[in-house]
């Protein structure tokens, strides 16, 4: 286990993204339970219109309630983690100010699609979460979140026998999609996998403290479709041309 050096001027900020229902809040709860004895932790959750995820974490008792705060984005989840991170950044900075010094602040995105990525202006590193219940073929479909997050987690592996998913094959597909980048199989019911996740987080905190970790920009989201009352539109977050959309009837 690496020794964690003295805190730097601010916390290590870790983004957690992934589709709806993949277990992002559960993953955060597992990290809090495993590491709150050695790290000072805070959490920012994102939902469009509710504080449901924050209330879940508070009710689970994984941290003192005042260290868990909710941001209601009022728009597509990726907007608040990439296009305009102001609300989230202010929430993180307020949390860091109120509980200084914090070692780790986790920012949970609202559930999104396979292209969701965090801006490096908001987080230092990011985890993308899939789960076996979403289908064994999801990992090989790729996308910026799967391919370029600092860590890809395949969650809920304990459910694999019930949904006919070959976990080893899913992990191999994920590794191929990430060109050998780190992939972790996780179940909150399998302590060894939670320990492996905690080891990864710990190593990232050590690198952040030592100044040896450089946040990477995984790149803008791929063009994607939003349904609306007029039929929907294709939306892009290409930073070279600005955020734009084209309606389809």
Image (cartoon, rainbow, N blue to C red):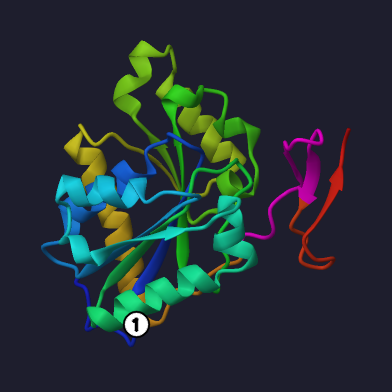
What x and y, as percent, mark residue 192? 20, 39
Magenta-tinted stretch: 218-235
> Relative to 173, does residue 40 appear above or below in the rendering?
below
Residue drawn at the location 37% of the way across and 19% of the way down: 160
Please state if 29 lies on the left or on the right of 84 as rendered: left
Give the residue number, with chain letter if any, for mark 1: 10
Q: Nearer the viewer, residue 52 or 28?
A: 52
Judged from the image, the secondary structure of the residue bearing numbered disc 1 is loop
What x and y, as percent, mark residue 87? 50, 70
Residue drawn at the location 57% of the way across and 29% of the way down: 138
What secondary structure characterizes most of the magenta part? loop
Q: Residues within 10 Å of mark 1 (few under 14, many from 20)?
A: some
Q: Quadrant of the N terminus?
A: bottom left
What x and y, as percent, mark residue 71? 43, 61
Residue 228 falls inside the magenta stretch: yes
Residue placed farthest to the bottom in the image? 9
Residue drawn at the location 19% of the way across and 71% of the way down: 3
Please state if 225 lies on the left or on the right of 44 as rendered: right
Residue 196 visible in rendering: no
Q: Nearer the viewer, residue 168 or 14?
A: 14
Name the image quarter holding residue 121: bottom right
Please state if 185 lies on the left or on the right of 218 as rendered: left
Q: Quadrant of the C terminus?
A: top right
Residue 70 falls inside the magenta stretch: no
> Relative to 18, does residue 77 appear above or below in the rendering?
below
Q: Nearer the viewer, residue 107 or 7?
A: 107
> Relative to 2, does residue 45 appear above or below in the rendering?
above
Residue 242 visible in rendering: yes
């Amino acid at each position: 286990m690496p020794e964690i050096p003295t805190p730097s001027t601010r916390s290590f900020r870790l983004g957690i993204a992934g589709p709806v229902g993949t277990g992002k809040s559960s993953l955060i709860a597992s990290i809090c339970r495993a590491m709150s004895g050695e790290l000072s932790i805070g959490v920012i959750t994102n939902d469009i219109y509710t504080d449901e995820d924050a209330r879940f974490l508070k009710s689970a008792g994984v941290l003192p309630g005042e260290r868990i705060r909710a941001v209601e984005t009022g728009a597509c989840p990726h907007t608040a983690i990439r296009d305009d991170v102001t609300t989230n950044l202010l929430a993180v900075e307020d949390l860091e100010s109120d509980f200084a010094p914090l070692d780790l602040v986790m920012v949970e995105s609202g559930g999104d699609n396979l292209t969701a990525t965090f801006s490096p202006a908001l987080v230092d590193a990011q985890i993308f979460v899939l789960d076996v219940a979403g289908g064994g073929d999801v990992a090989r479909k790729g996308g910026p979140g799967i391919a370029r997050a600092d860590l890809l987690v395949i969650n809920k592996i304990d459910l694999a026998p019930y949904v006919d998913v070959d976990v080893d094959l899913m992990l191999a597909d994920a590794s191929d999609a990430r060109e050998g980048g780190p992939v972790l199989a996780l179940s909150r019911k399998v302590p060894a996998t939670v320990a492996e996740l905690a080891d990864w987080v710990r190593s990232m905190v050590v690198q952040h403290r030592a100044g040896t970790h450089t946040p990477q920009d995984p790149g803008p989201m791929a063009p994607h479709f939003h349904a609306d009352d007029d039929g929907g539109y294709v939306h892009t977050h290409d930073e070279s041309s600005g955020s734009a959309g084209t309606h389809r009837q």
